[in-house]
Amino acid sequence: MYQDEQLTCEDCGKEFTFTAGEQEFYAEKGLVNKPKRCPECRKSRRVKQRAKRKMYEVTCSACGCQTQVPFKPIEGKEVFCKECYAKQQDK
C-alpha cells in the first residue's frame, strides 16, 4: 500500500526517504502532512526546543534524590525522578 518516497528537507536541503513504515505510522496516528525535515534536522530541532524549557529543582517523593522536572510542581502532589517514575509505571 505505501511506498518509500524521497522528500527534500526544508532546513538543510538534503534529500531523505519517507519510508513506507513511517507513512503507515503517520496514518495510524492520524497525521496527514508529510515531514518537512530530515531525521537529523528533526532531532536537532527537538534538542533545541528542550534546551529552552525551564526546569524546576525538586526532591523525588520516593527516593529523596534531587532531580529536575519540566513542570512547576504543585504543592502536596508527589513528584518522582526518572527511575522512580518508571517504577511507578510498571505497577
Image (cartoon, rainbow, N blue to C red):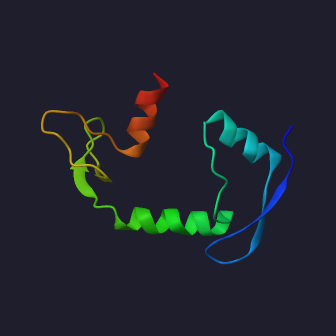
Residue projecting furthest to the front: 32
The number of numbered badges drawn on the structure is 0
Q: Is residue 63 left or right of residue 15?
A: left
Q: In the picture shown, does residue 41 fall above or below 62?
A: below
From the top left corner, tell me how far across and down residue 49 is, in percent: 43, 64
In terms of image quadrants, where is residue 1?
A: top right
* The C terminus lies in quadrant: top left
Nearest to the observer: residue 3 or residue 78: 3
From the top left corner, tell me how far across and down residue 2 is, in percent: 84, 42
Nearest to the observer: residue 8 or residue 38: 8
- Residue at image point 45% right, 69% down: 48
- Residue at image point 19% right, 33% down: 77
Residue projecting furthest to the bottom: 12
Q: Is residue 28 left or right of residue 55?
A: right
Residue projecting furthest to the left: 75
From the top left corner, tell me how far across and down residue 86 is, in percent: 45, 36
Residue projecting furthest to the top: 91
Q: Is residue 30 left or right of residue 23?
A: left
Nearest to the observer: residue 64 or residue 75: 75
Q: Is residue 8 left or right of residue 76?
A: right
From the top left corner, tell me how far across and down residue 62 is, in percent: 29, 35
- Residue at image point 73% right, 47% down: 22
Nearest to the observer: residue 88 or residue 74: 74
- Residue at image point 50% right, 62% down: 46
